[in-house]
Amino acid sequence: MSFVIDLTVHNSAVALSLRDCVLYFYIELYKSCNRMAPILEGVATRETPIFRVDVGLFPGLAERYSVQSVPLFLRVSSGVVTGSAKGWMSCIDLKTRLGLATMNTVGGQHG
């Protein structure tokens, strides 16, 4: 089961109310964003799912979190940003920057 979920108008309220999740802001046409797909699968867990946020579909959310560039990852715990990372990086680097390195070590290092 994948814990990488596309944010939609139907699940956005639930996503933003979770105790812990990662918001992945991206633009579909950007190659650097598309290269992150396998990395996302290696980071997402049941405890900390990743919600893919298309900036074009959710400009208000991008503005709320002051998104200036993509790809951007924000770890959000109970509505508060507790970690961030931007740009392309390996699975282990992303986990480390978001404070997830000790949580889910299964899946190994990607890229």
Image: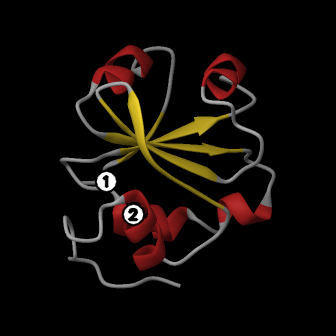
**Which residue does the numbered mark 1 point to in the structure image?**
2
Where residue 7 sits: x, y (%)? 49, 30
Whether residue 39 is situated above or below residue 78 in the rendered picture: below
Label 2 with label 1: CB-CB less than 8 Å: yes
Residue shown at the point (26%, 28%) measured from the top left: 18
- Mark 1 nearby-residue class (10 Å; few <14, some 14–19, many ≥20): few
Where residue 39 sits: x, y (%)? 48, 69
Quadrant (top left, top right, bottom left, bottom right) of the N terminus: bottom left
Disc tally is 2
Q: Which mark is residue 41?
A: 2
Q: Considering the numbered disc 1 on the image, is that residue within a helix, a strand or a loop?
A: loop
Q: Seen in the image, is 1 located left or right of residue 7?
A: left
Marks 2 and 1, how far apart in space? Answer: 7 Å
Whether residue 44 is situated above or below residue 27 in the rendered picture: below
State the residue in front, 20 or 35.
20
Q: Which mark is residue 22?
A: none
Scheme of image coloration: secondary structure
Where residue 96 sits: x, y (%)? 39, 70
Tell me the amino acid under the disc marked 1.
Answer: Ser
Q: Seen in the image, is 5 located left or right of residue 59?
A: left
Q: Seen in the image, is 29 located left or right of residue 78?
A: right
State the residue in front, 98 or 108.
98
Q: Seen in the image, is 20 located left or right of residue 87?
A: left
Residue shown at the point (47%, 75%) measured from the top left: 93
Of labels 2 and 1, earlier in sequence is 1
Tell me the amino acid under the disc marked 2.
Answer: Glu
- Mark 2 nearby-residue class (10 Å; few <14, some 14–19, many ≥20): some
Residue shown at the point (23%, 31%) measured from the top left: 19
Q: Considering the numbered disc 2 on the image, is that residue within a helix, a strand or a loop?
A: helix
Where residue 91 sits: x, y (%)? 44, 75
Q: Quadrant of residue 88?
A: bottom right
